[in-house]
Image (cartoon, grey):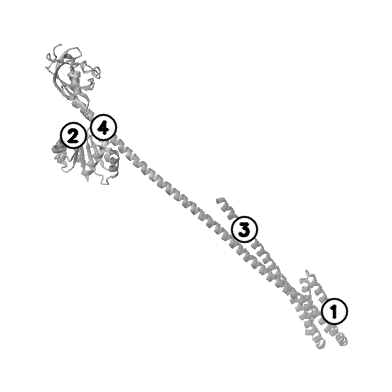
């Protein structure tokens, strides 16, 4: 999209540059034409002025010639000669001015062919008057076809002047058309450049709007992403806090349990009587140090062994059940305490130690899971052998 | 769901940054309680002995004391009595693993401590007691 816009802008700017070049080219060309036209107009006016001056000097020369013929005054002679010389000078100038314009130059040559006899006549008359030959002067004056010659010269000059004025009018019309063309060119260029600049402005505005829309969409997407990141971060922080709390709570529960276990062991281990914890099957699951101390047996030799491994109940002689009955098992099955039962403990060396046996069932929610047996020594010290 | 409750309570962090003195000879107890109360926004000092507790109270008086009943160098209740001489109005939570009958505890200890909690109590219960006593 970006490249496309840039190509369009380049195209528009290229169009603007071309229009500007065309206008500049046309304007320069018209300026050159105007300068050339101005030179030509000045030149043409010079030709006309010189022709008019020629006419004037011929009038003056002719008048001075006649005056001198009558007066013989040297000042009139000088004035006549000066006027004639001036007329010839103007004629030469006109010839020079029209040297590149054959039609006008031909006309000047034609005028010259009329002026030259007139000047020669005047010089002849002046010479005759100067020499005092009045007769010759009179003859020359009588034979002079001055009015006809002057008229021909006047007509030649008028023709030249008319043609020059006609050309001036044509040039004026051409100049006006050139000026109009220049105006139209300039205004057309201005309008075209305006349109092209408008197109450029529209393209830039359109492109800026598109960029703003894209930027807004990007910003919105970014905001949404940031919101999601914040939400996710908050969730992670909350989850982390939850995890930390759960971890702390678990650590606390573990240490509390461990503490209670240690405390319970402490209680049992602190009792000086022999304490044995039994399973429901009357196997030993735990003993306190007093048992180890009395029997000399290692705990590994006692744990998971039947209670009868170290303890034997003494059956009274009058007991109807006799040795076949097991009061401990019976009491455990019945879930009742057994107190003060006589018994003997056999130590590591086989010695038998008389004890008082008590048994208390262990209940877990109305279910008997084992029992606690406590043994109290009948007499301090070592008992008699069975 | 104690953990969640702990989390919710922990989220209500106090800006007052009140000071709590923890006295327990077990490092794990001091560590867990310290973490819990720190993330709950409290400033914590944790010591292991009665002598260190008395020194701490003199140097930086706490707003609340959480003490074990049995310390290596003193009886907890005796130590609390000595601390009360220095700070008569500071509330004390007695936290112990020794199992007492709750009714007996409330009768015997109510004049000496503000609150008795077994170490089997959950952290949520401990935090709630702390917040209740510190307002």
- According to the image, label 2 marks what residue? B69
Of residues A185 and B97, the one drawn nearer to the viewer in this rendering:
B97
The quadrant in which residue A181 appears is bottom right
- According to the image, label 1 marks what residue? A117
Q: Tag 2's secondary structure?
A: loop
Circle 3 chain: A
The percent coordinates of residue B131 (x first, y second) are 23, 43
The first of marks 3 and 1 along the sequence is 3
Label 3, label 1: how far apart the Cα atoms are: 68 Å
Q: Are marks 4 and 3 in contact (CB under 8 Å)?
A: no
At a point 33% along the width and 38% down the height, the residue shown is A243
The first of marks 1 and 4 along the sequence is 1
- According to the image, label 4 marks what residue? A255
Q: Tag 4's secondary structure?
A: helix
| Residue A296 visible in the displayed image | no
Left/right of residue A17 with respect to residue A282 in the rendered view: right
Label 4, label 3: how far apart the Cα atoms are: 88 Å
- According to the image, label 3 marks what residue? A15
The answer to whether marks 2 and 1 sit on the same chain is: no
């Amino acid at each position: 999209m970006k490249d496309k816009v840039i190509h369009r802008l380049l195209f528009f700017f290229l169009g603007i540059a071309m229009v500007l070049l065309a206008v500049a080219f046309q304007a320069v060309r018209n300026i050159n034409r105007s300068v050339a036209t101005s030179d030509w107009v000045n030149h043409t006016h010079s030709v006309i002025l010189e022709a008019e001056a020629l006419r004037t000097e011929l009038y003056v020369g002719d008048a001075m010639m006649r005056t001198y013929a009558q007066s013989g005054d040297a000042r009139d002679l000088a004035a006549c000669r000066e006027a004639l010389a001036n007329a010839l000078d103007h004629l030469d100038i006109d010839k020079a001015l029209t040297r590149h314009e054959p039609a006008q130059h031909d006309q000047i040559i034609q005028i010259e062919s009329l002026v030259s006899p007139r000047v020669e006549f005047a010089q002849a008359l002046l010479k005759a008057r100067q020499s005092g030959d009045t007769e010759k002067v009179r003859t020359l004056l009588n034979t002079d076809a001055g009015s006809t010659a002057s008229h021909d010269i006047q007509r030649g000059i008028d023709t030249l002047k008319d043609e020059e004025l006609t050309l001036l009018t044509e040039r004026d019309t051409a100049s006006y058309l050139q000026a109009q063309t220049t105006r139209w060119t300039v205004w057309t260029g201005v309008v075209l450049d305006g349109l092209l600049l408008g197109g450029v402005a529209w393209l830039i505005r359109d492109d800026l709007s598109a960029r703003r829309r894209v930027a807004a969409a990007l910003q919105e997407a970014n905001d949404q992403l940031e919101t999601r990141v914040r939400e996710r971060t908050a969730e992670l922080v909350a989850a982390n806090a939850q995890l930390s709390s759960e971890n702390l709570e678990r650590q606390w529960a573990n240490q509390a349990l461990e503490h209670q276990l240690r405390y319970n062991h402490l209680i049992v281990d602190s009792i000086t009587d022999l304490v044995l914890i039994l399973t429901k099957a009357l196997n030993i699951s735990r003993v306190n140090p007093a048992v180890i101390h009395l029997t000399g047996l290692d705990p590994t030799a006692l744990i998971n062994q039947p209670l009868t491994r170290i303890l034997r109940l003494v059956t009274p002689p009058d007991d109807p059940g006799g040795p076949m009955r097991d009061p401990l098992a019976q009491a455990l099955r019945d879930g009742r305490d057994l107190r003060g039962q006589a018994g003997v403990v056999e130590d590591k060396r086989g010695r038998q130690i008389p004890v008082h046996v008590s048994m208390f069932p262990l209940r877990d929610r109305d279910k008997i899971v084992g029992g606690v047996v406590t043994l109290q020594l009948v007499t301090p010290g070592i008992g008699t052998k069975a | 769901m104690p953990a969640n409750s702990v989390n919710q309570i922990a989220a209500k962090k106090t800006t007052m940054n009140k000071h709590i003195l923890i006295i327990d000879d077990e490092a794990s107890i001091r560590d867990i309680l310290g973490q819990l109360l720190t993330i709950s926004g409290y400033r914590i000092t944790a010591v292991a002995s009665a002598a260190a507790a008395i020194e701490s109270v003199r140097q930086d008086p706490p707003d609340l004391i959480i003490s074990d009943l049995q310390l290596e160098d003193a009886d907890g209740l005796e130590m609390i009595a000595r601390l009360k001489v220095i700070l008569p109005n500071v509330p004390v939570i007695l936290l112990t693993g020794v199992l007492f009958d709750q009714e007996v505890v409330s009768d015997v200890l109510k004049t000496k401590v503000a609150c008795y909690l077994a170490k089997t109590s959950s952290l949520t219960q401990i935090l709630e007691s702390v917040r209740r006593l510190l307002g």
